[in-house]
Image (cartoon, coloured by chain):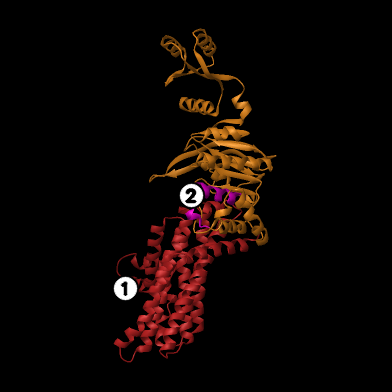
Chain colours: A orange, B red
Amino acid sequence: MSAIRTAGLVKTFRTGFWMRPVEAVKDVSLDVKAGEIFGFIGPNGAGKTTTIKMLTGLVVPSAGEAWLRDVPVHDPNSRARLGFLPEGTFFHDYLSAREFLDFHGALLGIPKDVRRERIPKLLERVGLAQAADRQIRRYSKGMRQRAGLAQALIGEPEIVILDEPMSGLDPLGRKDVRDVILSLRDEGKTVFFSSHILEDAEVICDQVAIILSGRLVRQGYLDELLGQEMVGSELVVEAIPEALFYELQGSAARAIVQGGRFLFEFGAEGDAEKALDKVRACGGRIRSFVPRRKSLEDLLLEGLHQEKAR
Amino acid sequence: MIPLQRIGVLALNTYREAVRDKLLYNLLLFAALMIASSILLAQLQIGKDERIYRDVGLGAIAFFGVLIAIFVGINLVYREISTKTVYTMLSKPVRRWEFLVGKYAGLLSLLAVEVALMSACFIGVLVWKGSGFDVGLLWAIVLIYLELALVTAIAIFFSSFTTPYLAGMFTVALWIVGHLLADLRAFGQHSDVPGLRALLETLYWTLPNLDRMDFKADASAGNPIAAARAGMAALYAVLYSAGLMMGAMLLFQRRDFR
C-alpha cells in the first residue's frame, strides 16, 4: 500500500510586481510505500519544501494530485494520521515543551488523560525530559528541533514528514534524529524526509528521490540506484620517491600531499591496481586503499549535469 | 473530533498568547489612568461632574478597546503566519476556517475580559463619586464591545491576505471612515461634483457604519435608549462581522503559506 503518492504535481507561484509565473515544482510523481524511510534529496531551492507543503496542505497544487494513505491531500482528513516537522522549527515559543505538546495533542483531539500519559514518554524519547517545563524560547537549536520532533509524534502518526530535520544540528544532534527516524521505521511508520545532507540520506533511507530545479531526476531504492559497481578508489601511501608521485599524479583524477603522505583518487579504469603494484615495487608503504561505490553525491552530480544539458 | 472542539483549543491558545502580550497591559494601564483622570477633569468643570465621569469613562473604554482590537488582533493572526507557527497547526486535520474562527473567538474572549476590566474601573469611579450606573450605560458598553468585535473582524479580514502594516493601516482607515460615514453622505448630498454623491452614497451603504453602535453621547447625557434601536445596532454589528469573517475564510482558504 502507498503511504504517500503524487501524480504530476505542479506548483507555479506568481512573484514580483508583474506577477511573473515561476514553476517551483514540475510534474512530480512519487510513490512511497508504507513502512519505508524515503529521502527527498536536492540542493536548496530545488522544490523539496514546496512539494512537502503541498503534501501537508499548506500550499495548494497548481496541477496534479497527491494522496496520503489514499486520501486526497485537499481533504483535511488526509492529515489525521500525519506528523509533520516543518523546516526551521517555528513554534509558540512562549510555551514550555509540555504545554506545546499538550496544545498540539488537544488539536488532534487526544483526550486529556492520554496526553498526560503520553507527553512525558515523548519528552523522554527526544531527550527533553529535564527541560520539559522550560519555555521553548530558552532552548538551543537542537532542543527546539527535538521539541518539534516530539510535536510531530504526539498523535502517534502513521506517516511522519520531516522537512530538513538535520539542518543546523551538530553531529550528535544529527545522530539522535537519525536514531529516532530508524526507530520510527521499526515501529512500522512511514518516514518521508527532505535533506540536502546526502550522507544522512545514504545511511538511513530505503528509497530516495532526487529533485533538481523542481523536477524529479531520479527515484528508486538505494541498492538499485547506486548498484554494486565500483566508480573509483582512494589510495593513501607513504615513503614513495618523488618521481613515482609525479607518475601516479598523471594517471590519478586527484593527487594531494598531506605531510609525508600522498593521497590519490582514481577512476574506475584500473589505474589504481597498477598504482598499487608500482608502490609495492619501489618499497613504498600503503596506508589505505578504499574502493569507492557510486554515492548519492555522484547521482546528484549526474542529475545536475543532465539538468544543465537540458 | 468535532470542529467546535478544535476551535475551542485554538481560541484558548489565542487567549493565552494575547494575555502574555505586554502591549495589552500597557494599554489597559493607560485606559485605567484615563478613566481615573475623569475625577481630576471634573473639578475643572463646576456642576457637570457626572457627565464628565461618563464621557471620559466611555470614551476611554472605546478608544483603548479599539487600540487593543487593532494592534493585538492583527499581530495575533499575522504572527502565526510570519513566524510560521501556522504550519504545525494547519498540517493537522484543522480546517482553515476553523483556524480563523478559533483566532476570532480567542480575540473576542480577550476583548470581553478587557472591556469588563475597564468597565469595572469605570463603575468604580461612578460608585466612588456617588454617581449612578443605569441601563443606558450598559447598552453603550455592550455596543462598544460589538464595535470592537466588528473592528477585530475587519483586522482579521485584512490580515488574512496582507501584511500586518497594511492590515493595520486599512483597519485604522476603515475605523475612522466608519465613524464619518453619515457626515460623508451629508457632504455628498450637498455636493455638485458629478458622481460624488453616488460614490459617497455607495460607501455609506457598503462600508461598516460604526456610528450606529455609538450610544456614548446618549448614555452620557442620561437620555433613554430604545431597546429596539440598540438591538438593531447590535444585529448590524453581528451580521457585518459574520460577513467579514466569511470573506476572510474564503481568502484564507486558497492562501499559499510559502
Does residue B89 show up?
no
Q: Chain of mark 2?
A: A
- Residue nearest the viewer, comparing B242 with A248: A248
Q: Is residue A136 magenta?
A: yes
Callouts 1 and 2 in the same chain: no
- Give percent across and percent down for residue B27: 40, 70
From the viewer's perspective, tell me whether residue B91 is left or right of residue B161.
right
Does residue B16 show up?
yes
Residue at image mark 1: B190
Q: Residues within 10 Å of mark 1 (few under 14, many from 20)?
A: few
Q: Residue at x 31, y 88 (%)?
A: B43
Q: Which residues are magenta?
A: A134-153
Foreground: disc 1 or disc 2: 2
Q: Chain of mark 1?
A: B
Q: Residue at x 53, y 38 (%)?
A: A195
Which quarter of the rendered picture does the N terminus of chain A lie within? Answer: top right
Residue at image mark 2: A140
Q: Residue at x 29, y 69 (%)?
A: B192
Q: Secondary structure at mark 1?
A: loop
- Residue nearest the viewer, comparing B140 with A298: A298
- Give percent across and percent down for residue B21: 45, 64
